[in-house]
Amino acid sequence: MISVDEALDTILSKVKPLAIRTAPFTDACGYALAENIVSREMIPPWDNSGVDGYAVIASDTSKTKQPCMLKVLDTVHAGNVSTKKLTPGTAIQIMTGAPVPRGTTAIVMVEHTRRDGQWVHIEKPAHEGDHIRKAGSDIQKNQIVFSRDHIIRPYDLGVLASIGKSKIRIQTKPTIALLATGDELLSVEEKLKPGKIRASTHFALTALLQKAGYPVINLGIARDTPKAIAAQIQKALKADVIITTGGVSMGEKDYVRQAVEKAGIKIHFWKIRQKPGKPMVFGSKGGKLFFGLPGNPVSSLVCFELYVTPAIARMASQPSPILRIPVRLDHPVSKKPGLRHFLRARLYIDDGQIKASLSGEQSSGVLSHMAYAQALLDIPENDGDKDKNDTVDAVMLDRDHLHQLIVSIL
C-alpha cells in the first residue's frame, strides 16, 4: 500500500495536457484559454454619453446666472452620429451611448434641464468631462483582456463579444468513460430482488462529471465475467479517462484489474493507506488514465473527489478543485493510527467559528450520509483519537455551503 500523498503524486505525474482546439466563444464557458486574448480595438471606440441629457460647452453653463439658456441644434440617439458641431451658446440633445458631438466638453443630465421649444434651460453648472465616457476607458487597443489558462465565465462572453472575438483557442477537456461492474447491480428502473442493489454510485459520478462540464461516455453495467468486462474496457479506451466502479478488491469475481492489464494499461498502484477507499487501482496507457474505484458507494465517491477530480482538472489546464479549510470538531472522534481517515461531516457556524459534526454512520456502504455531508474531515494516518475542539482539515464537498458559512460570519 502507498500513502494518500504518494498516490496523488503518482497520478498527477502521469497527466499529460490534451490538445488545444479552436471553438466559438459561445461554447467556451468553463474551459481554460490556450492563448492570451488581445483586443485589437478600443472599447468604447469613441467618446460617448453616459446619460440621457444635453451635450454642452461646460464654460457656457457657468458664465451666467442659473439657469442659462442654450439653443438646441440637434438630437442624437445611440447608433447615430450628429453632423452638428457645438459652438458657444448651443447644445445638442443626446441619449445614453450616443457618440459625443464635436465641440462637446460635458454632458448635462436631463434631470438638470428644462426644455422650451428650440431652447433648453440648464439649471446646474456643468464641469469639463461630466458624464463623458472616453474612448478606450473600458479596454485599450492591444490590451491583454484575458490571459492564457483563464477559465472562461459567462461574464467573459460579453467582453469577448465587445472586442469582436468570435473564435478562441481553448484547452480540450478530457472525455470520461464510466463503467459500473457487478452481477449485483440493477438499473434505476428495476425492482429490487434478493441480493441485488441499484447502481447508485454510477449516477452520482455521472452527475459530478457533467456538472463540471466533462463529456461522459456512459458504458452502463458490465457483468462479472472476464469477457464482459474486457469488452467494455476496449470500448472505454476511446476516452481520455476510464473510471470503473467495483471489481478491484479481493473477491473471486474481481476481474477489472485483470481486464485492464490485458488491454495494455500499466498498473501503477493498488491499495492506498486510507479509509474509506483503500482498494483503489490506478493505471495509465500513453496519455490515458485509468481509475478503478472501489465498489462500496462511499469509498468510490471519496476516491473520486480525492484523486479523479484533480487529475482531470490538470488535463484540462484547470486549477485543482480540492479546497481545504480548517474546522473544529464539535465532539471526540475515535481513530487508530495506520490509515488516513476521511470522515463525512456537516459544517456549521458556532460563535464565529466553523464547526464540524459527523453526518452520520461512517460505514463505506451508507450512501445517504455522503449525500448529507458537506465536507470530508481529513485525519492523518499516524494520528489517533481526536478530542472535542481539536482543529482538523476539511476537504469541501459543497462549495456553495462554504459560501453560506462565510456570509454568515461577516
Image (cartoon, grey):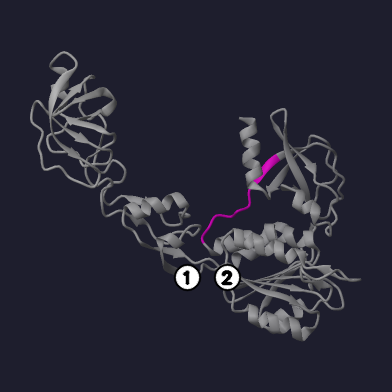
Query: If the image is split into quadrants, where does the C terminus sit?
Result: top right
Residue 185, image x and y in percent?
81, 72
Query: If the image is split into quadrants, where does the N terminus sit?
Result: bottom right
Mark closer to the chain start, 1 or 2: 1
Residue 390, image x and y in percent?
78, 37
**Residue 272 lies in what quarter of the image?**
bottom right
Q: Residue at x 78, y 70 (%)?
A: 246
Q: Identify the element where label 2 is drawn.
A: loop
**Does residue 166 sit above or below 146 in this rendering?**
below
Magenta-colored span:
317-326
**Does residue 96 sit above or below 313 in this rendering?**
above
Q: Residue at x 86, y 71 (%)?
A: 196
Instruction: State the predominant SS element of the stretch in magenta.
Output: loop
Residue where numbered disc 2 is placed: 175
Which amino acid type is marked by label 2? Thr
Evaluate whether residue 127 shows in this view. Answer: no
